[in-house]
């Protein structure tokens, strides 16, 4: 069985589908699959993902049965986790570039440490570069099946109550509190985000993710008290 599945929630950026699939295939050094997770009604995105994927090379897409709204990214990752059976999943996005060997480097750290949550180097976020956080993360299925990736318990990767931000922070910080965190500096998955790369224009999807920032920060502060006691 293939060890790794890369899950890519997408929304409203159909032009990114083909470059992302190409980046994944060109950088792949271990047997793995890539799955785009589309929203119902996002017709251009669905068409682009269909055109960019092929069962012959291990790439595919599926369409969720809900309309995109707050928490969509987390819901799509949880959906993808439930639909897969790989020992490891990687939570990606359509604005990343995979560097050759990223997958082997991340899996090596997971094997070496036994960690359930392994951060990768996005070459943008200063906290990530220092190895203290991760925006795109390798996650062990047994960890999610056990205590769970969030406070919500077994089978849940991300808490769906965040509008967009801080779901990854809860994953990482909770894993740290459990001794289940490691960081793979050589696993480079560049994040081409307008926060770090000013040549990347902002768009409606980025603005949607940023709109709930204050709500998400307050929610995180409340939830984090449960593992910081």
Image (tube, rainbow, N blue to C red):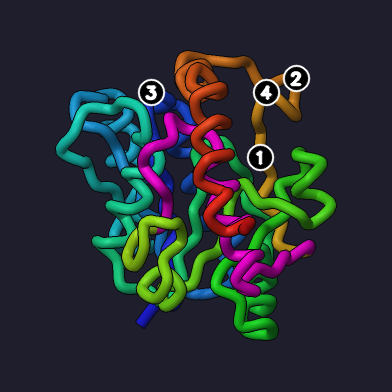
Q: Is residue 32 visible?
A: no
| Residue 146: percent from left, percent from top | 39, 76
Mark 2 / mark 3, whichever is N-terminal: 3
Q: Residue at x 73, y 19 (%)?
A: 199
Query: In terms of secondary structure, where does tag 1 sit?
Result: strand
Disc number placed over residue 194 in the picture, else none = 4
Residue found at x 36% / y 42%? 160
User: Does the magenta run of residues contain 13?
Assistant: no
Q: CA distance from mark 2 to mark 1?
A: 12 Å
Going from N to C along the chain, the mark reached first, 4 or 3, is 3
Q: Residue at left 65%, top 74%?
A: 179
Residue 172, above or below 76:
below
Alpha carbon distance from label 1 to label 4: 9 Å
Question: Within 10 Å of the Cα at label 1, are there few (<14), some (14-19), or many (20+) other Cα atoms?
Answer: many
In this picture, which residue range is highlighted in magenta? 157-185
Label 1 sits on residue: 191
Q: Which residue is mark 3?
A: 12
The answer to which of marks 2 and 1 sits earlier in the sequence is 1
Q: Which mark is residue 198?
A: 2
Work out whether residue 173 or residue 125 is closer to the camera in this orientation and state it.
173
């Amino acid at each position: 069985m293939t060890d790794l599945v890369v899950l890519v929630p997408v929304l409203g950026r159909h032009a990114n589908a083909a470059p992302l699939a190409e980046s994944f295939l060109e950088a792949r050094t271990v047997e793995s699959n890539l799955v785009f997770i589309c929203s119902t009604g996002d017709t251009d995105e669905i068409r682009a993902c269909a055109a960019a994927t092929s069962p012959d090379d291990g790439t595919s897409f599926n369409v969720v049965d809900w309309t995109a709204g707050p928490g969509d990214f987390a819901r799509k990752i949880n959906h993808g986790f439930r639909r897969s059976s790989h020992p490891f999943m990687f939570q990606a996005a359509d604005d990343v570039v995979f560097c050759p060997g990223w997958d082997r480097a991340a899996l090596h750290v997971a094997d070496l440490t036994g960690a359930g949550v392994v951060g990768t180097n996005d070459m943008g976020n200063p906290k990530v570069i220092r190895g203290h956080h991760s925006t795109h993360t390798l996650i062990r299925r047994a960890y999610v099946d056990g205590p769970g990736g969030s406070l919500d318990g077994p089978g849940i990767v991300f808490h769906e109550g965040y509008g967009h931000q801080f779901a990854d922070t809860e994953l990482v910080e909770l894993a740290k509190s459990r001794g289940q965190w490691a960081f793979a500096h050589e696993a480079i998955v560049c994040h081409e985000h307008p926060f770090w790369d000013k040549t990347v224009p902002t768009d409606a999807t980025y603005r949607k993710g940023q709109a709930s920032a204050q709500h998400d920060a307050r929610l995180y502060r409340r939830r984090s008290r449960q593992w910081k006691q």
